[in-house]
Image: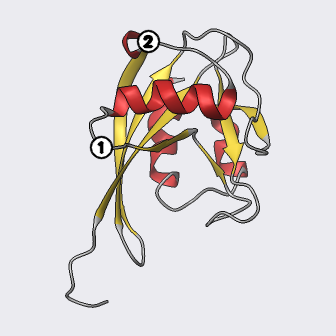
Amino acid sequence: MSDKKKPILLVAACALVDTDNRILLAQRPEGKSLAGLWEFPGGKVEAGETPEETLVRELNEELGIVTKVACLAPLTFASHTYESFHLLMPLYICRRYEGIPQGREGQAIKWVRSKALRDYPMPPADEPLIPFLQDLL
């Protein structure tokens, strides 16, 4: 590893929880980095956006659902160094949203019980978030 500082990438993620206390996972589609791995939906925080605003936008774009900033509760965060950047990723819980989630960008989605989260291969930054969700649910 070089001494060169890596840029920090801020990405917001959401554990969308249904009425049965299952969590929605999305599979990274072919052609994206880490394709085939399962992750919590979300995306890059753009200039001038808060992480909560990012999730409201991304959940609508990726899954076709509508939620509000007030419906997002911060739970924990991940801090992980990848080869070319450092990822900082706050994880929010959302139980209140309108619509039925569907993969609008070609990604597979699946509702998963918290105890089964480890059955799905995830990016290295997502894995440390699992115990927090298992404790909560």
Q: Quadrant of residue 77?
A: top left
Which residue does the image show at 68% across and 29% down from the upper left? 63
Image side of residue 98 versus residue 49, left or right: right
User: In front: 119, or 126?
Assistant: 126
Residue tagged 1? 47
- Which residue is outermost to the front? 47
Identify the residue under disc 2.
Answer: 71
* Identity of the residue drawn at 74% across and 55% down: 29
The C terminus lies in which quarter of the figure?
A: top right
Q: Upstream in the sequence, badge 2 or badge 1?
A: 1
In the current view of this chain or complex, which residue is farthest to the bottom?
2
Q: Measure how far apart labels 2 and 1 are at the Cα level.
A: 22 Å
Residue at (76% x, 37% y) in the render: 109
Q: Is residue 23 above or below residue 84?
A: above
Residue type at numbered disc 2: Cys
Q: Where's residue 58, x and y in %?
A: 53, 33
Q: Characterize the local packing of mark 1: few (<14), some (14-19) or many (20 or more) Cα atoms within 10 angstroms.
A: few
Q: Residue 76 sits in which quadrant?
A: top left
Lateral position of residue 19 relative to residue 5, left or right: right
* 33 sits left or right of 77 in the view: right
Which residue type carries mark 1?
Ala
Q: In the image, is residue 17 above or below residue 119?
A: above
Indicate the position of residue 27 as horizontal and vertical percent values.
72, 49
Q: Nearer the viewer, mark 2 or mark 1?
A: 1
Q: Position of residue 56 (x, y in %)?
A: 48, 24
Q: Secondary structure at mark 1?
A: loop
Q: Residues within 10 Å of mark 2 (few under 14, many from 20)?
A: some
> Which circle marks residue 130 in the picture?
none
